[in-house]
Amino acid sequence: MPFGVGHDIVVQISRSALWSFFSEIKTENIHNVPSEGPLIVAATHHNMIIDPAVLSVTFPENRPLHYWAKDTMFKHPQAKRFLENCGVVPVDRTTKNNTLLYAATYEVLRLNEAIAVFPEGTSHTLPCLGTFKDGTSFAALEYAKLVTEDPRPNAEGKIPQKATVLPVGIVYPEKSKYRSTVIVRYGKPITVDSYMATYAEDPKKAAKQLTKDIETSIRALTVNAPNWDVRDAAEMARWLLFPGEHGIMKDYVDVTQSLINAMIDLGKKTPEVESLQHSLKIYKLELDLLGLKDSHIAKYNEKNITAASTTIELLRRTVASLIDLPLFLPGLVAHLPLYVAGYFAGKFEIYEEVRAQNKIFFGLALVPLIYMIAFLWAWYALFGGTFFGFFVALATLGVFVWYHVVSIDERYEDFKDLIGRWRLFDAVVLGRGMWRRKQRILALKKLREENVSNLRWMVKTYKDTNKDTHHVWTAVRARVQALNAAGKLSGRRKALARQFEWAF
């Protein structure tokens, strides 16, 4: 089933949308991806339509991917033409005959093309993987059976091969947050040969075993916790142990999963670790309720949260923002409708897995209008509506959009930090708030110091006896060695080095 121009258009739109929403999309272990042959890409599904967009945009060697869709979507002739042009494959869910169910899929695989599926079935927001369905496994095994029984050459004159299953974990540290990151991790390919004997005798048993192996592989590529309490505690521990690193940290998945495993294992044996886990959860909950981030409290590690220190920090941040504002203000004003629409798109959506999708859809709907108005204004107001001015205005708009997107990250973080400073100032200096927020913030600072101290104690105490804690210690030491190798430090690196002094 060849791909048409519709596929290229959708991928380019997806690329632009993802580039403008996420600050970075990282790929890991791309050497695991087969460069040729029929391929079934089995991926996690935590972020609605964002998941296929991320896969299609980042898949190695720009190899196009087919996707499954209900055959009812193909009933209208125009819809059918567009979906087929984009490479979407119909699946007849009304039949229990695998050959009919996946007929279009087999045609794709016979052409040595790749199809991406989501074994969890539906998108979700859980602290772990959802329940895997057997559809992916049945498709792979039934196709292998058909190839064995009917090895006739495909349209290119080549003997068809059995399809390989490629596990993929798509990890979102903060999946609905603007300018967050995405991590795409490729697992080792799974061949179906070892399941075929069982499939001949008991198809359901073989499919269940393959599904289990796919799930095991994807679990190793992602972050999984038994509940949100453990997941949130581990995320908070990561923030405290690795200050300044958020979704951009190179070993996010491995470190976060190691913290989850360590807290579960040690929490069963050690009351101190169990208490630490609960304390980390409380700390995160209080931060959320006060509208603050750990970085706001961390600024006051070595001094009290006083009226003077709070005011100085606020003024420092405000002045820095005002100095930078003239450079950023034109882009901010032009894109303000996008930010407002994105804010409300996320604010009134109860399902987190839908928020990023809605924000991007609103952006795609408004972008053409905003950029058209900006272009016409530049063409007529700045360049007199001339023929030459048309091209200059077009180039100016392109540079304007590029500059805004590439420069938004640091300013967006600074803006969120400034909001936090104002909240601290409001609570500590102005003393407003019916819940005595000043006392809560002072207590929060104390709780943070206790959590940091206890976390470091846990890592140091169990680094030689618990493999997951040892992995966290190794990650900390890697930062220490990098800082030591930097020689004389200054600025942010010097401040960061102070946070790792406990491990020097």
Image: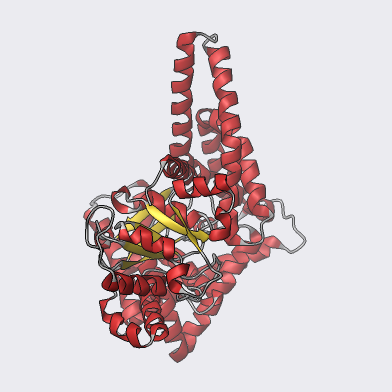
Give the answer, above or below, for where 125 lies relative to 454: above
Task: Using residue 429 as the reference point, say whether residue 87 is left or right of it.
Answer: left
Q: Residue furthest right?
A: 434
The residue positioned 34% from the left and 58% from the top of the image is: 114
The residue positioned 31% from the left and 60% from the top of the image is: 110
In this view, the residue in front, 307 or 13, is 13
Work out whether residue 460 can be spotted: no
Work out whether residue 75 can be spotted: yes
Quadrant of the rendered image containing residue 214 = bottom left
Question: Which quarter of the image is occupied by the C terminus?
Answer: bottom left
The residue positioned 48% from the left and 73% from the top of the image is: 129
Give the answer, above or below, for where 116 lies relative to 272: above
Marks counted in the figure total: 0
- The coloring applied to the image is secondary structure
What x and y, as percent, mark residue 55? Answer: 40, 55
What x and y, as percent, mark residue 369? Answer: 60, 30
The residue positioned 30% from the left and 52% from the top of the image is: 60
What x and y, as percent, mark residue 379? Answer: 53, 15
In this view, the residue in front, 329 or 350, is 350
Task: Using residue 178 as the reference point, say whether residue 86 is left or right of it.
Answer: left
In this view, the residue in front, 105 or 45, is 105
